[in-house]
Amino acid sequence: MVYSSGVMTMLGFRFLVAFLLVAASALGQGSSTVLIRIDLTDAPRHLVHVTETLPAHAGDNGFSYPEWIPGQHLPGGPIDNLTGIVFRVGGANGAVVPWRRDLVDLYSFHVQAPTGTNSLTVSFDVLEVPSRANTIGTAHTSSHVVMLEPSETVLYPRGAAVREIPIAVTVHLPAGWSTATALRTGDQTGPMLHGQETTFATVSMEQFVDSPILAGDHCRLYPLTAEVKPTHTLDVCAEKAADLELQPAFLGNMSSLVRQAGLIFKSHHFEHYDFLVAQSSHLEGDSVEHTQSADYVVKSLDMTDLATGRFNGYLLPHEFVHSWCGKYRRPAGMATAEYHTPQQDDLLWVYEGLTQYYGNVLASRAGFRNLQQGLDNFVFETYNVDIPGRKWRTLQDTADASPILRGNDPTYASWRRSQDYYREGGLVWLEADMKIRQMSHGEKSLDDFAARFFTAMGPDGDGHPGVSTYLFPDVVKALNETQPYDWAGFWTTRLNELTDKPPTAGLEAAGYTYTVGDEMVPAEAEFIKGSRSAEMFRSLGLFATGDGTLRDVWLGSLAFAAGLGPGDKLTMVNGQPYTGELLTKVVHDSKTTSGPITLTAVRDDESGTYTIDYHGGEKYAVLQRNGKPDVLKEILAARP
């Protein structure tokens, strides 16, 4: 609803009347359809108003707010941002009905409805601010751009299968705004921007929650690859109209991404696909995968900027791959009937690991990265899992424990380990790719597995969005059908072995040796220079930010043995004021100096001196050609 000084405005009244007429019509056809009206008028003030009509009955009714949201891998529904809850019987102006939160399940509510009730109308507000329960998708509203995750805006009958709940959605925007979404109106035949008030065709609640809503006052659609069906569109809303003038090279890369992905997966399970991009310097970067769309919140779309180009060039392919790997084909333990049952994350090494691999491959094949950047990225992937925590936590446990690892404090991240099923999973999939190539004498590759495993299984082939579940034996079966091998043993070993070395067999077979050198790869060097930090993991065992704060210190390293720890702030290096450049130079010069490195650091307002006897010079992770055929270059090359 739209209010002014506590009184409903005439415009808001007219829209409410229209919504209630739609509700009355739908309820006349059958009270099972959920009706929801999302009012984004106050979204620039970080407030979303929702009115929802739900099927109900006399007596106790249970309703739940989404907790385990697909794609988040943890119980992250922002329940703390759900406010202003009022239930009514008899419509939006009916009598108020009391409710109470469940004492065990805080995401559920009990409502006692009077005799004769067949529906309840609930109104509530969603605060678009950071949530203590959530790491993805909240606080994405600004004065000119909104990216809304529908899961924030719904209650549903407790325990009901969301795939079986029909929902009719109406979205109301601030004056002069437009919206883009994978949802379609009843008469819509192609992608389009929608105006101030739009009612979309009835879909399942599962599909609605899977369809984010992008809105803003400067929006434009960019058709991609007219020769590829179904339709793919880049939908952008930006802070300024000038930000919509996208670079032709970037649009070319986007079209190449669609073509190159099609050459891998061979089929499409969706009816259409929308890349939804919110560009705003006032919002934190984020992205979430969906079946017929993906949503991206970015600071800029200027791909000539190095950092921006890398960030966007990684996210765009990654979330697109997820439409096949994670949304359409989904681990059975993650394909729950509703959003209350905990998901089982043990197959995230497929869901995210295989996506990580193909996201990186497509970033190069589509042209977001040149060959050197693609190679540097494999250094980065390996470097990030070449950490002390490998000695005690397996790759499998990083997946099993994902709900408690995502979004943790970075202190001792190298010892705790985090979501390594992404990067390490991708490296093991590279090894699987190389085994298929070697055993088939170059006749087959992991692309053949992908085409088999992700084949659209709708009754008429392509174009049927939905979920096709799998278990570990299904992955093994598809791999064996691609190339016979002991794939069950392969994955069981890689997932459960404890080793202090990262999985580099795939790189080695593809023509590259992961090792240590005295120069950073260009991508890391540019990042270090720009951030003025000092990456000394493989020499001293620490990483210092531009202001001297130690972001991490490796257990067992020289820095740890000297007494340093994460959070300490370096102030002096060999008696001179700290800079990242100075620390790097001192480590570089250590090969030719006889004295130790002396660091002064502050911890809890107390200064201390730490001495490190080191004379090995700079050491950084690198890839070196090993004399074998350069298959990695072939893997990264675009397909004709």
Image (spheres, rainbow, N blue to C red):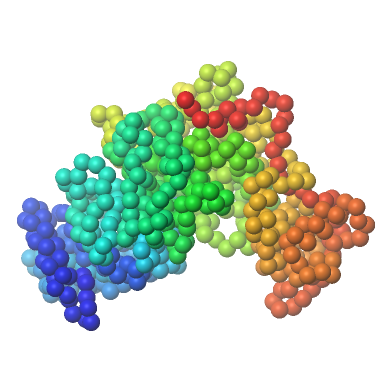
Determine if residue 382 is in view.
no
Classify residue 169 as left or right of residue 355: left
Residue drawn 43% across and 67% down?
Answer: 130
Classify residue 104 as left or right of residue 551: left
Please tell me whether residue 491 is drawn above or below residue 216 in the rendered image: above
What is the tally of numbered marks visible in this picture? 0
Work out whether residue 401 or residue 609 is closer to the camera in this orientation and state it: 609
Can you give x and y, in whole percent of width and height, for residue 230 in the image? 30, 35
Residue drawn 59% across and 22% down?
Answer: 438
Please tell me whether residue 351 is drawn above or below residue 488 in the rendered image: below
Can you give x and y, in whole percent of width and height, for residue 314 in the image? 51, 46
Quarter occupied by residue 322: top left
Work out whether residue 172 or residue 205 is closer to the camera in this orientation and state it: 172
Work out whether residue 529 or residue 134 is closer to the camera in this orientation and state it: 529
Residue extending farthest to the right is 594
Determine if residue 46 is in view.
yes
Residue drawn 65% across and 51% down?
Answer: 526
Classify residue 587 as left or right of residue 36: right
Please tell me whether residue 423 is drawn above or below residue 578 in the rendered image: above
Residue drawn 64% across and 34% down?
Answer: 507
Can you give x and y, in whole percent of width and height, for residue 576 in the image? 82, 69
Quarter holding the N terminus is bottom left
Can you give x and y, in whole percent of width and height, for residue 344 in the image? 43, 48
